[in-house]
Amino acid sequence: MERRRSAVNVGGKGSVLSPESVFAVANSIASLRVDPSLAQKPSQSEPPSGPSSSREAPTLNLTPEETRATIAVFVNKLILSNFSSKFRPSLAISLADAINGDREVEIAPDFSRVVVGDGVEFGISAKEFEAAEGAASASFAVAALIEHSAASLCPVVDAVAAMSCEVSAVDGKVFDLPVSSEGLGSREVTDVAADMKRIVFGSKLLGSLKEIAFSSIPYMHGSLRGAVKALRLKVRVETNSAERKFSGYMFSEADLVNSVLPLTNLLRNLGGNSLARAKTCIETLKDDELRVRMMEAVSRKCPTMECLKERVKRILEVSADESKGALILHDIYVLLKQTREIVAWEAAVAVLVLRVRERALANAANEPGEKEKNEKKKKGSSEMVVGKGTAAIRLVIGQVIESRLRCENGNVDGKVNDADTQVAEWASEICSLFDPKDPELTALLDTVKGIVESNEVRRLPKIPKGTRDFGKEQMAIREKAFSIIVGVFKRHGGVALDTPAFELRETLMGKYGEDSKLIYDLADQGGEICSLRYDLTVPFARYLAMNGINNMRRYQIAKVYRRDNPSKGRYREFYQCDFDIAGQYPLMQPDFEVIKIVTELLDELNIGNYEIKLNHRRLLDGMLEICGVPPEKFRTVCSSIDKLDKQTFEQVQKELVDEKGLSRETTDMIGSLVKKRGHPQQILAELKKEGSPFLGNCSSVLDELEILFTALEKSRCINRVVFDLSLARGLDYYTGVIYEAVFKGSTQVGSIAAGGRYDNLVGMFSGKPVPAVGVSLGIERVFTIMEQMEKEQKEIRAAQTQIMVVVSGDKLGSLDVAAEIVSELWSANLKAEFVLTSDKNIGKQFGLADKSGIPWVLMVGKNELQNGVAKLKDMQAMKEEIVPRSEVVKVLSSRLLTFQCSSSNVVV
């Protein structure tokens, strides 16, 4: 089929060269078009005269496809280097014209010139070579070809594997994977499993087979999706970046190669599994001779696992040489094509085996004696009911085979005599179909896309990564925790405040240091640029400034949002519980009270052992000054030091030296100081010793801390505090004491509360400083601890039902009787639920009450109604008593009061 050639524009405003565009130009699907406005610009570089200066460029041995892709990338980078005064517009236009024709194009081994088939040469100067990252252009180009080809392969391998699953009678339960909603699993893996279920939906061919080549499909294909997704962004950035003035292109090229290398083992394993599935499909054939001939055809003509291993071995051997980036990527591209060929063989085998089965069934149906049986089964044999998705995919592939081999259904029936030739021909045509440059691949990809995106009603819904649903048991824990937290906040005079979930973006920016990149921006819907709140402190400061409030004790419990990488205990949407004291107070008074509040919260939540790490921002700045860190780098260095709770000092030191530009001597001094931690008064005494460098510029800070530590000692909570000079708290707005509570139990959750003094934040909005200090409780991590304790102790139950009313009768108990009784209980503020049941099912209701932890069961049956009584059962003591109907509310109120007093530690 002829494909009409489109144009890929470069050099225009906003133009971007995507991997798909590189592939299209490389395969003459599209032409490269340089923006006409560039032709009007004067040349900013002289043409090369004679041999160029010695340039470091690896010897290039590229295929015609890779050569055209390399020139396309080189032209784009040459245009991007326009501002480097090294650009000849005429060269970019000439090179684009050279690859738009049908002529052969070659690049000189040292990238000094491009030679067109008709003898025309275009010289490339050393400056142009460097500005356009000539040596790396080949690597960027081949990486783009790999990314686009691998992206096209992802839906294809799913479709082919689904057909093999049907042919081999795979157990469909291998795709029943739980949906990951907390960042604990791969989203791509669960997506593949869900897609596979939709493709084979309705199939009657699935069975009980659980071989690894099939059960690993979600994990193998999901890993491929994830790798391609990561590579796409990397290739797009590298292909469209201008000249590196500092790091040099060698680093970006090596980094890109390292991003592609994970595909090596993935493709090898993908191909190996595909080959194994093809052979499993052949083993299902009942005709021995046909089975042998097809197996021989696969063994002789299909790429083998040994071929893939040899290619991988070569790639890994060459990968140690960073100067051979293009060669490494070329081999990975070849490996991808070999894998695609194996997948095509798997598809050919699956389609052919199904065709053989259909032919056998049709022949059997026409045999004498079978006609009468088939009349009774008008719908035909359920054995050949394929999935709706696989049927559609098979139809597309079948149409391509028949049109290209110019044959009809009757001539492609998998006869024994030509089975080996037939499957090889089919595999060849299907491999051509799977190539991204084949125009008919679009129809197949659209078919697969339509299948996986349709029938949403059958698709298990998901929630975004980093968010959670909370079931009834979790909500019981949360309600108990929030009740305790609000009680502590109110005890200290806190008043409730609520602010919008999103703020103007200008309100949030510039307050969180390097963490500002984690702010969630919203699409402009109403003429304002808004973002979801990152914390509750900045909105509180904005509220004080906007309303001219100078003094306030406020608490707020609300959700905040971080554009973070979800992991265990780390979410993108979560609750914070904040308490802040704003206003003028005697020195260290609010600082002491907020730290005291932290200890009360964690003690009353009864989560176990914890410690509160404490430091002072001005003391930290003084330490950095002592070590020789320039003042303009204080905040960024603090952000690195703040990682010491998750990384070793060696890792942080490497970041400080390589990225932040500090000397090794400076970081060694920082390391010797940040290791100081211990009892507050002991560390303080050490810092105040005669000769201490802190006495010079931090004496007032040390005096403040002495006042604070004395107050904490008098309040009997200093044993919970650790003076830790490594605590940095990377947020920009802190000005004084900073602290962080860390859980010390077996459940690994890290920091569970943090805060500090921020005297200048309100002034950023109003120009009038309002000193403030506060703390934020990381309630999600606290809940994780409490949920683990609940699992171990089984103390908290979800429902708070106190009484289950069971009304029974010959068929079902009477609703009017139940309505009268439970209404009396509800009016007395008792928590009750009711069940209508038959006499024979009363025992089940006792089991339900026991499982739910309901302490009392009130039973009313035919006999109780006649005698004006009710039967009351104590589920803990397993004792029953008869209660007059008129006394039910009174008796239950009394019993429940006693029960609650004896079970004060249990939520009921």
Image (cartoon, grey):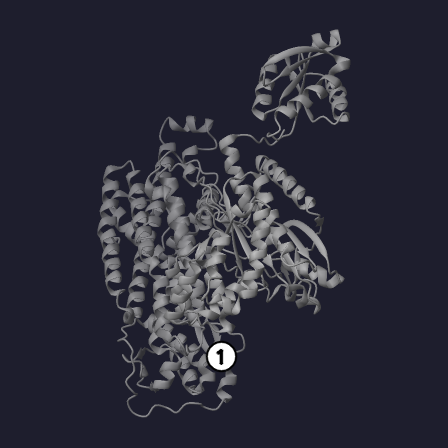
Q: Quadrant of the C terminus?
A: top right
293, 315: nearer the viewer: 315
**What residue occupies the far front of the structure in this picture?**
690
Measured along the vertical axis of the image, is residue 32 above or below residue 329? Answer: below
Residue 712: percent from the left, percent from the top? 58, 49
Q: Quadrant of residue 150?
A: bottom left
Q: Is residue 437 visible?
A: no
Residue sitting at x 69%, y 23%: 897
Q: Amino acid at mark 1?
A: Gly
Q: Is residue 670 left or right of residue 603?
A: left
Percent x, y of residue 867:
74, 7
Q: Which residue is mark 1?
A: 11
Query: Which residue: 59% across, 39% down?
Result: 604
The correct choice, above or below, for 50 with respect to 590 in the image is: below
Could you tell me which secondary element the residue under label 1 belongs to? loop
Q: Relative to the observer, which residue lies in front, 347 or 851? A: 851
Residue 335: % across, % down: 30, 59
* Picture quarter with the N terminus: bottom left
